[in-house]
Image (tube, rainbow, N blue to C red):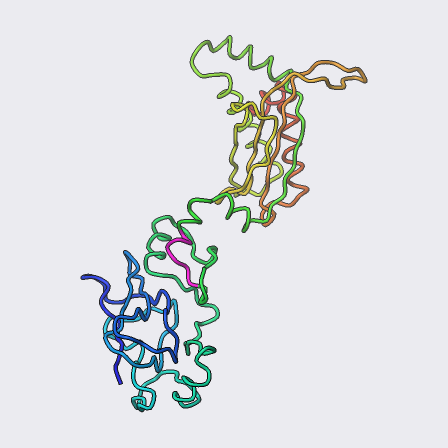
Amino acid sequence: MHKIIMPPGGQTTDESVIFSWQKKVGDKIEIGDVLFEIETDKTVLEVESFCGGWLRAVKYAEGETVPVGETVAYVGEADEPMPEGENMDSPDVPIEAKITETKKQASPILKQPERNRILASPLAKKIAREHNIELKIIAGAGKAGVIKKRDVLDYISKPKKFAADHIPCHAVGFDVDMTSCAMFLERLDGYLGGGREKESRLEDIIAKCAVRAAKKFLPANSDIKVVNFEMFGADWCAPAITPPESCVLAFGAIKEKAASLNREIVSRDMMSLTASFDCREIDAESGARFLAEVKKLLESPELFVLAMAM
């Protein structure tokens, strides 16, 4: 009976993860066959068999971390007795019968991972730590639900998609009459002269209105992010929430539109204002009141100035 041991994955590696099993218990093994793959903190390596025979038993499942030098499987003849005193799973029927009668249906005899344990490769853990990511929010791939390097990199490359998947949110939107505010910005721009662009001043004013409104209607520890879509000429957008924000406020371009004022159709400078809220922190009513307050301050610049002065 031949022991298959965990090989060293590098000069500084004293343990590796079973990345995948390429053979299952009951399979015929030839010298040079790839038995399993291991994942170190740098790469994935194939482990070949140095002996022939039948794969009699395996001791570790995909995703489990195994010290270098530890026995992970046994390869031997069909009628060869298993070693005594080994803590491992083995077939309940004679290996000869398993090989001849159920070879096509044979499956790995694996230890089941703990249900609440998060399985991840060392490289996946390392990348997650570097990017301050909790492994529990990343869906693992593979039979054992093991989080691999590619899972973490996919999460990093698509933050908005994963945020939308894991953060329950609701959105509110208003059309804001920016006619008075636009005139206010023109006077302010004339008073201050060159320097900062009008768009930057508008974003600053919206951010200050948001902070003022948040003090009245949102929880004390809400983080708020303001997103400017005016520069792209967009009318509106539904902003996605990404941690650590619990509220994302977005505004579109100011455009001249027909609007009703005192029961008359007039031309006004209109702008869309939308906000997304984390439902776990901000309820729908508070979110709507918050955005209505921002709208109120933007439509009445004198209120904004007085509010900032108090």
Report the side of 69 relative to 291 (left or right). Answer: left
Residue at image position (58%, 22%) is: 253
Report the front residue among 129 and 225. 129
Quadrant, the N terminus: bottom left
Report the front residue among 207 and 129. 129
In the picture as drawn, the residue positioned furthest to the left comes out as: 11
- Percent from the top left, x then y, of residue 188? 53, 12
Report the side of 142 relative to 282 (left or right). Answer: left
Residue at image position (37%, 72%) is: 23
Quadrant location of residue 271?
Answer: top right
Report the front residue among 41 and 279. 41
- Is residue 116 a member of the stretch shown in magenta? no
Residue at image position (41%, 76%) is: 108
- Percent from the top left, x then y, of residue 28? 34, 78
- Percent from the top left, x then y, of residue 221? 52, 43
Question: How many marks overall?
Answer: 0
Report the front residue among 165 and 264. 165
- Percent from the top left, x then y, of residue 249? 56, 34
Tell me: residue 291, above or below residue 281: above
Quadrant location of residue 181?
Answer: top right
In the picture as drawn, the residue positioned furthest to the right comes out as: 263
Quadrant, the C terminus: top right
Q: Which residues are magenta?
A: 146-152
Report the side of 261 relative to 91 (left or right). Answer: right
Report the side of 87 relative to 105 (left or right). Answer: left
Residue at image position (34%, 52%) is: 127
Tell me: residue 64, above or below residue 52: above
